[in-house]
Image (cartoon, helix red, strand yellow):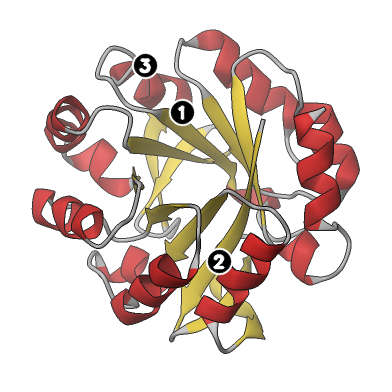
């Protein structure tokens, strides 16, 4: 199982939000590239980066910081936040991003996902962000009337790499991953699932490891707050 340490960007800084609320941001670092290097030094081979400002703006806002992260990190960078056009997908791939995470556009422009997944096999991830089982969009500011499972199933045969499932109500809250909902999504369709939202400690890594259809888990605040040692988490996931 892959452990993805997370770097969420707001105004060029490394932050974590509580329940996706931009007004409830805690700043953890001023140098995102240096943070990426620390994660690499701990043994991380994958990094999950989110342009939070971009998620609300619908286009890249923290592009300079992202490019510096890609340059500094020795492994694979997975990027989300405001990626809603073919041009932006191709630009980030040209900059060295390995996977593009598409959320809002997966709901509003599904052809973008299917076409990109066809042309860039294994490099497109669909974000299925949930509030009470319904898909949240626009940086989680809006909630649609589309159930998460319905959105997930639209892309089962499209060639996407994985689904990124976030329980928005748990994100940044250290309440523990919603294991039941994550596993239920994995079992209800055929795509691998990446768990996100609420990781509180090593117990969450152990609870997800080895579960059917779970490719990985994203963790941010638990690492920054010292509740989870990244090197230990990587070792647990590899057992």
Is 182 situated left or right of 57 in this image? right
Question: In this rendering, does residue 175 appear at all?
Answer: no
Which of 81 and 161 lies nearest the eye of the viewer?
Answer: 161
Residue 144 placed where, x, y %? 37, 41
Q: What label sits on residue 153 in the rendered view?
A: 3
- The mark that comes first in sequence, 2 or 1, is 2
Residue at (16% x, 59% y) in the render: 91
Residue at (80% x, 53% y) in the render: 231
Which of 236 and 216 lies nearest the eye of the viewer?
Answer: 236
Q: Are marks 3 and 1 in contact (CB under 8 Å)?
A: no
- Camera-side mark, 2 or 1: 2
Q: Quadrant of the N terminus?
A: top right
CA distance for labels 3 and 1? 9 Å
Q: Are marks 2 and 1 in contact (CB under 8 Å)?
A: no
Q: Quadrant of the C terminus?
A: top right
Q: What label sits on residue 148 in the rendered view?
A: 1
Under tag 1, what secondary structure?
Answer: helix
Residue 20 placed where, x, y %? 55, 62
Is 52 situated left or right of 207 in this image? left
CA distance for labels 2 and 1? 25 Å
Give above or below for 118 relative to 136. above
Q: What label sits on residue 7 in the rendered view?
A: 2
Q: Residue furthest bottom?
A: 30
């Amino acid at each position: 199982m892959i452990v993805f340490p997370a770097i969420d960007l707001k105004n060029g800084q490394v932050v974590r939000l509580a329940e996706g609320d931009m007004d409830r941001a805690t700043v953890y670092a001023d140098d995102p590239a240096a943070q990426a290097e620390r994660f690499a030094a701990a043994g991380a081979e994958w990094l999950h980066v989110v342009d939070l400002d971009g998620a609300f703006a619908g286009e890249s806002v923290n592009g300079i910081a992202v490019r510096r992260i890609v340059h500094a990190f020795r492994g694979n960078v997975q990027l989300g936040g405001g990626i809603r056009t073919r041009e932006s997908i191709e630009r980030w791939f040209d900059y060295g991003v390995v996977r593009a995470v598409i959320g809002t556009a997966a709901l509003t422009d599904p052809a973008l996902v299917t076409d990109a997944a066809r042309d860039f096999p294994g490099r497109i991830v669909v974000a299925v962000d949930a509030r009470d089982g319904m898909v949240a969009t626009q940086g989680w500011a809006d909630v649609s009337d589309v159930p998460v499972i319905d959105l997930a199933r639209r892309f089962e045969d499209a060639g996407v790499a994985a689904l990124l499932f976030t329980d928005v109500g748990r994100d940044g809250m250290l309440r523990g991953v919603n294991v039941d909902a994550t596993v239920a999504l994995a079992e209800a369709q055929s795509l691998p699932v990446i768990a996100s939202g609420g990781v509180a400690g090593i117990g969450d890594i152990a609870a997800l490891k080895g579960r059917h259809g779970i490719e990985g888990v994203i963790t941010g605040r638990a690492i920054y707050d010292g509740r989870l040692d990244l090197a230990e988490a990587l070792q647990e996931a590899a057992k």
